[in-house]
Amino acid sequence: MINKMITNKCPNCGKGTIYKERNIYFNFRKPRMKKECEHCHFVFEKEPGFFFGAMYISYALGITQAILTFLVGTLFYETLFDMRILIWIAIVLVLLSSFNMRMSRIIWIYMLRGI
């Protein structure tokens, strides 16, 4: 299941894709989702506002990335709480924001696919 999430596959059939773009990882344009799967016609957005809950998943991904960046950053500086690590955390979060938005929507679709 995680492999299907990472490769942008439909949660119902595993053949179609969720996003129109081929590269969903480092694409800084607005995401263009398909309305339904081209193979099994599974509807991705159930109702208006369906993806508001995906913001919580995006927040969790961002916090995880910030903590990991902090832990890696402490290896390169002499003091544990060096303020320069905050700059690296901000850079990482900005660079991964597009990825977080796309991935959080995919995770949200997979979590609520039976509804």
Image: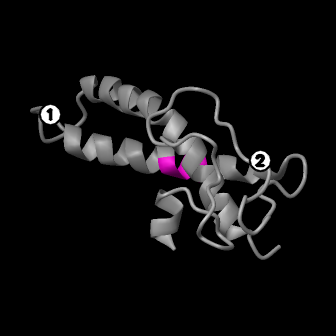
Going by the image, does 40 lie left or right of 88? right
> Which label belongs to residue 12?
none
- Percent across and percent down for residue 4 are 51, 66
Which one is in front, 43 or 79?
A: 43
- Percent across and percent down for residue 23 are 48, 41
Name the secondary structure under disc 1.
loop
Q: Mark 1 points at which residue?
A: 79
Q: Residue furthest right?
A: 47
Q: Earlier in the sequence, mark 1 or mark 2?
A: 2
Examine the rendered structure and indicate whether residue 111 appears above or below residue 78: below
Mark 1–mark 2 Cα distance, whole angstroms, equals 39 Å
Q: Which residue is drawn at 63% across and 46% down?
A: 19
Q: Which residue is drawn at 25% across and 34% down?
A: 81
Q: Indicate yes or no whether the magenta region holds residue 48.
A: no
- Percent across and percent down for residue 33 are 70, 44
Task: State the scheme by which the image is colored.
Answer: one colour
Q: Which residue lies furthest to the front in this view?
A: 39
Q: Residue at x 53, y 35 (%)?
A: 98
Using a 10 Å C-alpha cutoff, classify the residue at mark 2 as few (fewer than 14 neighbours), some (14 to 19) or many (20 or more). Answer: few
Q: Mark 2 points at which residue?
A: 52
Q: Which amino acid does label 1 sit on?
A: Thr
Question: In front of the other: label 1 or label 2?
Answer: 2
Q: Which amino acid does label 2 sit on?
A: Phe
Main SS of residues in magenta:
helix
Q: Which residue is drawn at 86% across and 58% down?
A: 46
**Magenta stretch in the rendered image:** 57-61
Examine the rendered structure and indicate whether residue 107 appears above or below residue 56: below
- Percent across and percent down for residue 5 are 53, 62
Name the secondary structure under disc 2.
helix
Going by the image, does 76 lie left or right of 37? left
Examine the rendered structure and indicate whether residue 57 appears above or below residue 90: below
Q: In which quarter of the image is residue 37?
A: bottom right
